[in-house]
Image (tube, rainbow, N blue to C red):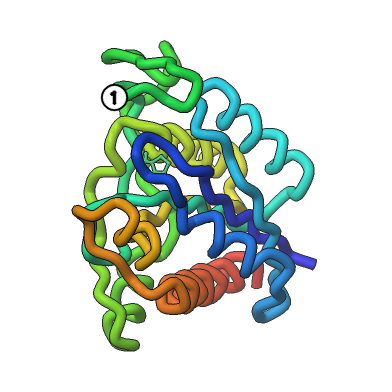
């Protein structure tokens, strides 16, 4: 069966809950239009998460790679357009704090996703879920994992890869106190819609 690798992250910084974990756990094992979703959780650790992603890709051999990340403070579901060759930002969960580092010294500056992000956003909005394309995945773990996924997709032409940032869930918003939150069921439904759009274009690739 054709495979989708769906990843989420563990909690990090002052976000004690990461709703991407719940979404990934919920969708793990679901079959949509002949595509099987395999969910995996990544560490918030620059070194380890890239290795984990590569290991999961090698194990699952996905046709589609969709990574999810929490963007605490965003109001909408935001499929990302671009990943850049930079690591910079706050400490990861093991205390590593890169400053202006390249992900790869000889890496290209940026990669654009080949997921159908415009279709995803249009579909979400049509179904009543606020969404927009984001033109920056930041320079922290999410950008790092998106860059790794896109690098793999560039090397494997049949693969589509990308990243979707989501807002906080209600429980996280309440716990945090300063960020907007969504119902977790709506987040799950929203990601399902995005996956449906990814499958739609991916199945044309292989036809
Ligand atoms: N969001 C962070 C890293 C882990 C996550 O869920 C980010 O946006 O980089």
- Examine the rendering and report whether any part of residue 79 can be seen: no
Instruction: Name which residue lies at 32% across and 65% down.
Output: 77
Identify which residue, 158 or 164, lies in the foreground: 164
Snapshot quadrant of residue 63: bottom right
For mark 1, does the 10 Å Cα neighbourhood hold few (<14), some (14 to 19), or many (20 or more) residues?
some
Question: Between residues 24 and 151, which one lies in front from this camera angle?
Answer: 24
SS at badge 1:
loop
Q: Is residue 106 above or below residue 207?
A: above
Left or right of 137? Residue 42 is right
The location of residue 32, given as percent across then percent down, is 66, 78
Q: Residue at left 35%, top 25%?
A: 85
Label 1 CB less than 8 angstroms from ligand 1: yes
Q: Is residue 104 above or below residue 34?
A: above
Give residue 161's position: percent from left, percent from top. Answer: 51, 51
Q: Who's the residue at 71% across and 35% down the image?
A: 55
Which residue, given by chain and number where applicable, does mark 1 sit on?
A: 89
Which image quadrant is residue 121 in? bottom left
Q: Residue 104 location, x and y as percent?
A: 45, 17
Quadrant for the N terminus in the image: bottom right
């Amino acid at each position: 069966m054709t495979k989708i690798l769906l990843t989420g992250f563990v909690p990090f910084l002052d976000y004690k809950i990461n709703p991407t974990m719940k979404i990934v756990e919920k969708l793990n094992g679901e079959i949509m239009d002949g595509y099987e979703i395999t969910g995996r959780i990544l560490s918030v650790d620059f070194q380890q998460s890239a290795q984990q992603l590569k290991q999961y890709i090698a194990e699952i051999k996905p046709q589609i790679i969709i990574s999810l990340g929490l963007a605490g403070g965003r109001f909408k579901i935001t499929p990302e357009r671009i990943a850049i060759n930079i690591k910079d930002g706050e400490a990861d969960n093991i205390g590593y704090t890169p400053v202006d580092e390249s992900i790869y010294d000889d890496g290209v500056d940026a990669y654009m996703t080949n997921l159908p992000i415009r279709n995803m956003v249009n579909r979400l909005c049509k179904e009543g879920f606020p969404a927009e394309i984001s033109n920056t995945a930041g320079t922290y773990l999410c950008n790092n994992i998106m860059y790794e996924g896109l690098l793999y997709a560039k090397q494997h032409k049949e693969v589509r890869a990308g990243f979707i940032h989501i807002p906080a869930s209600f429980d996280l918003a309440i716990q945090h106190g300063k960020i907007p939150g969504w119902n977790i069921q709506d987040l799950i439904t929203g990601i399902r819609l995005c996956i449906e759009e990814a499958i739609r274009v991916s199945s044309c690739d292989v036809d």
